[in-house]
Image (cartoon, grey):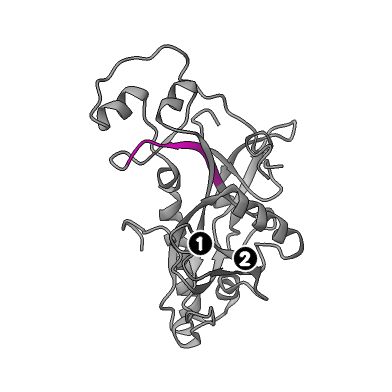
Amino acid sequence: MSDGFLDFSVGVDDADVGKKTKRFVPKDDTSYRFTLGWYSVPLRNEEGKVTGWDDDFAWNDDGTVSDEAVVRFSGCERVFAGKGVGYVLYKGPAYAQFGQARQTVATILVVWPTDDEGELDVAKFTAGKGYQVQPFVFSTDKYNVLKKQNKKFPLLTVDVAAACPENGGEFHQLTFSPEDSNLFRKLLASDKPEFQAVAEQIRKDIAAVAMNIQRELARDMTVDEIKEAMGQESDTPTGSTEHAAKDVDDMLKGVL
């Protein structure tokens, strides 16, 4: 993609609605259960190269998940330009003055109601309460763990158990392991109207979060805009500010 962002899924091109949604941040000594719920279909040209993504194609007319659907991720290179600015999209050498560029990944989670040990709160789940649809921004090493897990336990069919150790919340330390089922898919497959309604609301929530997922990763700003936000004098630096689009395998080379 020419804008510096790159959407992808495991094995594909990678060697509340209307409200501001808080991103998933783990707490110390707490376990979670979540579904990676951002489903999409990669669009390919005649050579088989992915040219875009269509979330609508991930769903059949009857509300079931298409056989072509995959779990979608978005990624970029970004730099931290200070507390007043936050993370900005790295678009070339001119951005190195603000910090070292790091590759980062994002997706969308359906975080289910559990106790601190990660055990499902069945009463809340069956009542359609307690779940949260949240953007999840994480490092490429965590993506690598999920990628490996996907080989034996496909992310489309099973949930992920995530455990944050004591004093691990500050740096988002998490260990992942597969659950034995996918709660979102269970809701989608239910013939009970109340569960169908919950599943439909989750779909709407995911779509709303997806609209701003790239903003969760980084702000797309020029060098002058960054300097102005930092209270520095703006100028137009020499050198290219264009960042060539990369394939996922190239973007993650040496990291995964």
Quadrant of the drawing holding the N terminus: top right
Which quadrant of the structure image shows residue 34? bottom right
Q: Is residue 32 visible?
A: yes
Front in this rendered view, residue 147 or 203: 147
| Separation of marks 1 and 2 at Cα, in angstroms | 14 Å
Question: The disc labelled 1 sits on which kind of residue?
Answer: Leu
| Residue on which the image places disc 1 | 109
Return the mark for residue 156. Answer: none
Residue furthest to the front in view is 167
Which residue occupies 56% across, 24% down? 244
Return the mark for residue 176. Answer: 2
Relative image position of residue 237 (x, y in whole percent):
38, 14
Relative image position of residue 23 (x, y in whole percent):
41, 57
Magenta region, main secondary structure: strand
Q: Earlier in the sequence, mark 1 or mark 2?
A: 1
Which circle, 1 or 2, is nearer the viewer? Answer: 2
Relative image position of residue 197 (x, y in whole percent):
45, 73
- Read off the magenta span: 74-82
Crowding around mark 1 (Cα neighbors within 10 Å: few <14, some 14 to 19, many 20+) is: many
